[in-house]
Amino acid sequence: MRLGVASELWRYPVSSLTGERLETVDIDDTGVVGDRQWGLFEADGAAVAAPEKEKRWRPVPALRSRLETDRPEISLDAMAWHGVPSPSADRVASDHLGFPVRFLCFGAADTAPRYDRGHLHILTTSSLARLQALLPDAVIDTRRFRPNILIGTDDGDADFVEQRLVGRRLGIGETVVEITEPCARCAFTALGQPGIPFDKDVLHAIAKHGGGGFGVLAKVVAPGKVSCGDTVSVN
């Protein structure tokens, strides 16, 4: 059964930073290749950036990240880019936050990912439309919710349609994934980002109407390539 098409594809090379929108992604057994492999840490400790929990980390999403020739780069203005790891990248982030930080690869020097999660985060335009209907004055932007794949649903309904697919498999381009659970939400959805204002009502609406979940998590069953416009089918 056809569900829609892959309308947006996203990768976040550095956790908590704004990611990059792509036309095509390679998906392996762990998810989008290059996704969330790096983190931002205190310079003199093991504390990882947690914008949803600590006020001092809230400016982190204003930093951008992208992957260039298998190496992450970060930027504050999308003009000057700095390779990670490097003293210049650490300096830009430290100056932005007002305290010393550094970029580290997860799994190195006893660092661990911020949280255990599914291989992929999938969201639908139907869910975005449902949330927009609940909050007509809010800025409901894909970037606020940080999915890997946004599915443009064929029916266009304003509803949390993907949550009804938990336990089902989706074919997306060359890839097959299994939907494992709703994506639980935290205060990150309320945070401001470039072009997106702080809005605590977003999380409140999700908690009230979506059971705390918005979008779904999925595990990779068959790796492959996914491109924007690829058909998404429910198997």
Image (cartoon, rainbow, N blue to C red):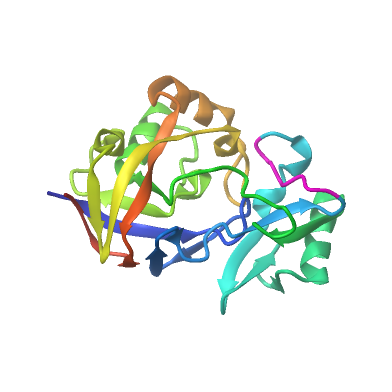
Asked if the stretch drawn in magenta spans residue 46, the answer is yes
What residue is drawn where x is 40% and y is 64%? 28
Q: What is the quadrant of residue 160 in the picture? A: top left
Q: Which residues are magenta?
A: 45-52
Is residue 227 among what the camera can see? no
The x, y position of residue 205, in whole percent, is 46, 25
Is 167 magenta? The answer is: no
The x and y percentages for residue 169 are: 23, 48
Q: Residue furthest bottom?
A: 69
Identify which residue is drawn at 70% across, 69% down.
84
Q: Is residue 218 left or right of residue 52?
A: left
Report whether 182 appears left or right of 110: left
Judged by its main secondary structure, the magenta piece is loop
Q: Between residues 201 and 11, which one lies in front from this camera angle?
A: 11
Question: Is residue 79 positioned above or below 191 on the image?
Answer: below
Q: Residue at x 64, y 67 (%)?
A: 78
